[in-house]
Image (cartoon, rainbow, N blue to C red):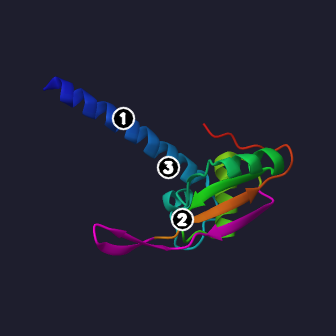
């Protein structure tokens, strides 16, 4: 029984470390939009979009691509990138994906559209993804 208990403790330690990291970054964010908490503001950027196209853009043009929340705006994304990565974006472009009709086992439904942001940086600025 002790084996199962120790595994739980390790997971809870990892989760608490991640939560404190998000809370620390959320505390450092200033001038949040009205009605948005710090944690929700940081979570507007879901993850970096690492594809062949995104890699080529980042190498040549200093453009980085992120999957973002469907409610995020350009100004909010700009602020979050500035706080998380310590670089000042020149501009941000947003692209919405199209919703798709799908069927699975005879039932039809919709696959929700995603939203991605292209973040342009000055020459010499870099974002390192670990």
Q: Quadrant of residue 66?
A: bottom right
Name the mark nearer the viewer: 1 or 2: 2
Label 1 vs label 2: CA separation? 28 Å
Residue 56 location (% of width, % of height): 75, 47
Q: Nearer the viewer, residue 85 or 100?
A: 100
- Residue 1 lies in the magenta-colored region: no
- Residue ID for mark 3: 23
Give the mark nearer the N terminus: 1 vs 3.
Answer: 1
Disc 3 packing (10 Å; few <14; some 14–19; many ≥20): some
**Which residue is the extreme one toward the left?**
1
- Residue ID for mark 2: 69
Residue 62 location (% of width, % of height): 79, 50
Secondary structure beneath label 1: helix
- Check whether the beta carbons of the residues at disc 1 and disc 3 lie within 8 A of each other: no
Mark number displayed over residue 13: 1
The residue stretch that appears in magenta: 89-111
The answer to whether 15 is drawn above or below residue 106 in the figure is above
Name the mark nearer the viewer: 3 or 2: 2
Residue 126 location (% of width, % of height): 76, 43
Label 3 vs label 2: CA separation? 19 Å
Residue at left offset 49%, top offset 57%:
39
Disc 2 packing (10 Å; few <14; some 14–19; many ≥20): some
Q: Is residue 101 visible?
A: yes
Residue at left offset 80%, top offset 53%:
121
Give left or right: position of 115 versus 107.
Answer: right
Q: Is residue 87 visible?
A: no
Give the mark nearer the N terminus: 1 vs 2.
Answer: 1
Label 1 vs label 3: CA separation? 15 Å
Give the mark nearer the N terminus: 3 vs 2.
Answer: 3
- The secondary structure that most of the magenta stretch takes on is strand
């Amino acid at each position: 029984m002790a084996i199962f208990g120790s595994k739980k403790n390790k997971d809870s330690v990892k989760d608490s470390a991640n939560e404190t990291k998000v809370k620390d970054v959320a505390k450092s964010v200033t001038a949040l939009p009205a009605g948005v908490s710090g944690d929700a503001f940081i979570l507007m950027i879901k993850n970096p979009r690492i594809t062949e196209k995104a890699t080529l853009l980042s190498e040549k043009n200093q453009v980085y691509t992120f999957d973002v929340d469907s409610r995020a705006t350009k100004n909010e994304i700009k602020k979050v990138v500035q706080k998380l990565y310590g670089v000042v974006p020149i501009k941000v472009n947003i692209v919405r994906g199209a919703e798709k009709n799908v069927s699975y086992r005879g039932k039809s439904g919709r696959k929700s559209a995603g939203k991605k942001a292209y973040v342009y940086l000055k020459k010499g600025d870099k974002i390192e993804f670990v």
